[in-house]
Amino acid sequence: QSSLVHIALACEGVSSKDEKGVLTSLLLNEVMGKGPNIKWSAGSNRLQRAAQAVADGPCLVSSFNLHYTESGLFGVHIMCNNNDTHKVVKAVWNECS
């Protein structure tokens, strides 16, 4: 049995019809950390750094950004050790605030 947990924190994003909103959310996704640029690496985005600063075990954090016709979805995917869940989620939440 794995001790790793997956957590998604998400909110409503922008519609693909909103060109300025799409560009803004794409920029935010880049700034927050869309994931590693090197395959299988942990990356070093700001969300990842915030999580690793408080985690005792391995963790991986990346933002995601989806655009649909009527709405969108913007959020963060967290994978961490079960024992680190509260600390990591709090650190990532604070970084997003």
Image (cartoon, grey):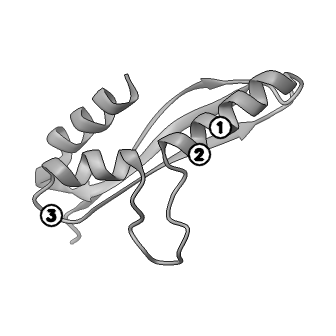
Give SS at disc 3: loop
Compared to residue 67, the image places residue 88 above or below, namely below
Judge from the rendering whether residue 43 lies leftward or rightward of residue 23; answer left or right. left
Q: Amino acid at mark 3?
A: Gly
**On the image, which quarter does residue 26 sit in?**
top right
Task: Name the residue carrying label 1.
Answer: 27
- The span from disc 1 to disc 2 (Cα, nearest Å) is 5 Å
Label 2: state its secondary structure.
helix
- Circle 1: element type: helix
Viewer-proximal residue among 75 and 70 = 75
Q: Quadrant of residue 24?
A: top right
Visible in this render: residue 70?
Answer: no
How much space separates mark 3 and mark 2, taking CA atoms?
Answer: 25 Å
Q: Position of residue 41 (x, y in %)?
A: 42, 74
Q: Give the mark toward the camera: 1 or 3.
A: 1
Task: Kindly identify which numbered label has been placed on residue 57.
Answer: 3
Q: Earlier in the sequence, mark 3 or mark 2?
A: 2
* Location of residue 7 with respect to 79 vertically, above or below: above
Residue hosting label 2: 30
> From this viewpoint, is residue 86 visible?
yes
* Amino acid tagged 2: Glu
| Mark 1 Cα shell of 10 Å, populated few (<14), some (14-19), many (≥20) | few
Which quadrant of the rendered structure holds the C terminus?
Answer: top left
